[in-house]
Amino acid sequence: MNSESLVLFFLLGVILVGGAILFSSFVAPKSWNPVKMEPYECGIPVKSGAWIQFNVGYYLFAIIYLIFDVETVFLFPWAVVMKDLGMTAFIEIIIFFFILALGLLYAWKKGALKWV
Amino acid sequence: MSFSIYDFTSLTQSVDQALKNSLSPTWALIIEMVIVGLIFLMFYALLGLFLVYAERKICAFIQNRLGPNRVGPLGLFQTIADLIKLLMKELIYIKQADKLLFNLAPFIVIIASFMAIAAIPFAKGLHAIDLNIGIFYIMAVSSLGVVGILLAGWSSNSKYSLIGAMRSGAQIISYELSVGLSLLSIVIFSGTMQISGIVESQADAWWIIKGHIPAIIAFLIFLIASTAETNRGPFDLAEAESELTAGFHTEYSGIKFAFFFLAEYMNMFIVAAIATTVFLGGWMPFHIPGLLSFNTVMDYIPPVVWFMGKTAFIIFIMMWFKWTFPRLRIDQLLKLEWKYLLPLNLINILVIAFVVLMGWYLH
């Protein structure tokens, strides 16, 4: 099949989840209770919501990830033609990795990879 | 090649031709899509049921228990009973939750796994889509699942969910690098990203054998990183039940919870199938170069059996991980990826490039 049939697999997911939730909404019991509709907090009354300012620790990893993920995108076409290009490709990727490793070392030394 | 008796290309092509001859192109396409859709829905559901059962049995075996054994023979219908129970449970809504995103999240995780499964080759000619950037495509869509997890955690407006989702986000994006780079190493070997091409390149021997030490290192990195990427095993911080109740799906109930549960198992199947395809030769039988009679005997085992057998083996290893190792802390988890796996992976890629350059592999 061709790549337009990806739409089919998208639709399959929608049908499976949507169908099951629809079916469940018919057969499942419904009862209303103000306490039941609160988020779970070990049974004690809920104090404020969870939409608050969050620890930056996670975001630093996300930023470093972004750099390396873009780099992976560059590496894939290189990997495909590596065999044909031979030595040229090898030397170029050493330079590429050297710059990349400097970036990782910088983040490492700055303590960005340390959990706070 | 002696795979002709198990070649599905002619079968699918003849079905395609028959439909196109008797119907207009639009209708032929629609009917084909319905057939493929039904097959994949059935496969997906059966696989989900079987994997949940297998996990419970293996877990019980490792913990010296019996596991499910009441419903049906050997407890085989236990998962179906559980599914019916989950369908009949109330779908609880959280008053403060973001309704749209809360309902959208299970859709995203399931759609991501469906789109990834589309590119997996089960046998020659038995794959839904054979894109020329297959490996890249699978990486791209399988990482969409994290969006669903983040949405689920954030939209619940619950502290446990939010912490679970944030951890999961940090973990999945970190380990995705290792998954991508270890797959990249085999792309260097085979020189193509097309999945059928990668499988064809392993006709004489699998990459893990042909690529010897660097390929084995890449395989081990892939195994560790993909276990982490599916939120499983010792890396299940996102739903660490002893500290976070259930992590990102704390507030989900009934069938919506079941979909997060199902997606976890399907993702496990997908990463095991990728590992099989890329490192263990996909549906290619086990061949020893030179032993002609042995290879001929191996050819008689259908490729689907080879593929599912190898995938089941990797799934078993991942389940073994989960029930053997203690859970890591989040700082240990990120340290393992960023300070050990990633530098090792980068060096390994250089080594592989050098090995390919010098021709120090079987070819």
Image (tube, helix red, strand yellow):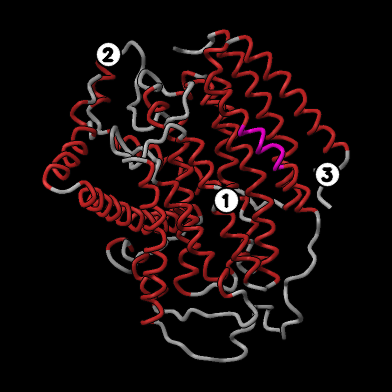
Q: Is residue B64 at all visible to an observer of this figure?
A: no
Q: Residue at x 27, y 13 (%)?
A: B292
Res B233 label: 1
Nearest the camera: B220 or B94? B94
Residues flagged by tags 3 and 2 on a common chain? no
The numbered mark, 2 or 1, whose residue comes first in the sequence reads 1
Q: Is residue B181 above or below residue B106?
A: above
Q: Secondary structure at mark 3?
A: loop
Secondary structure character of the magenta stretch overall: helix
Q: Amino acid at mark 3?
A: Ala
Q: Position of residue A66 (x, y in %)?
A: 70, 42
Q: Is residue A78 above or below residue A8?
A: above
Q: Amino acid at mark 1?
A: Gly
Q: Secondary structure at mark 2?
A: helix
Q: Is residue B93 above or below residue B192?
A: below
Q: Tell me: A88 left or right of B25.
A: right
Q: Tell me: B88 left or right of B16.
A: right
Cβ atoms at labels 3 and 2 below 8 Å apart: no
